[in-house]
Image: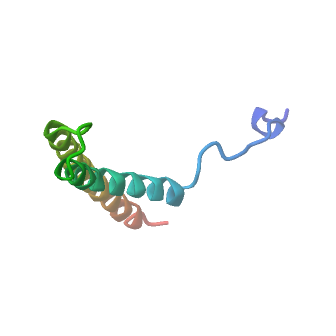
Amino acid sequence: MPSARMSRVESAGSPDFKQVFTGLMESLNTEMNAPDNLLKDVMSGNQNVDIHDVMTAMSKSEISVSVATQLVGKVINAYDRISQISV
């Protein structure tokens, strides 16, 4: 009896690790630049941007950096564990 797996067509349901990681880094870069851009708007006299928006963007940026740092640490830890596996 053939397995159920052979009868279905398998395709990649998600992008590869490089694409995901690149997307995360681009998102982090955007988060890091947001407070600077908002601060420039406030200093140029834009009435649609408040200093509270700048502070909120700075907090988001700080959290994003913290998460990214923890993520990189976990990826490095996982790589170390995988490299220690003997085949």
- Position of 68 with respect to 12 (left or right) is left
Reply above or below: 58 against 50. below
Rendered-image quadrant of the N terminus = top right
* Front one among 72 and 42: 42
Name the image colouring. rainbow
* Residue for point 18% across, 38% down: 50
78 or 39: nearer the viewer: 39
Residue in the image at 34% along x and 64% along y: 80
Question: Does 17 sit left or right of 50 as displayed?
Answer: right
As drawn, 4 above or below 14: above
**Residue 71 in picture, x, y percent from top left:** 30, 52
Task: Give the x, y percent position of residue 83.
Answer: 40, 67
Judged left or right of residue 9, residue 82 is left
Q: Position of residue 27 (x, y in %)?
A: 39, 51
Q: How many marks?
A: 0
Q: Which picture quadrant has residue 60?
A: top left
Question: Is residue 19 rendered to the left or right of residue 65?
Answer: right
Displayed quadrant of residue 13: top right
At a point 53% along the width and 57% down the height, the residue shown is 19
The correct choice, above or below, for 79 with respect to 47 in the image is below
Above/below status of 70 relative to 81: above
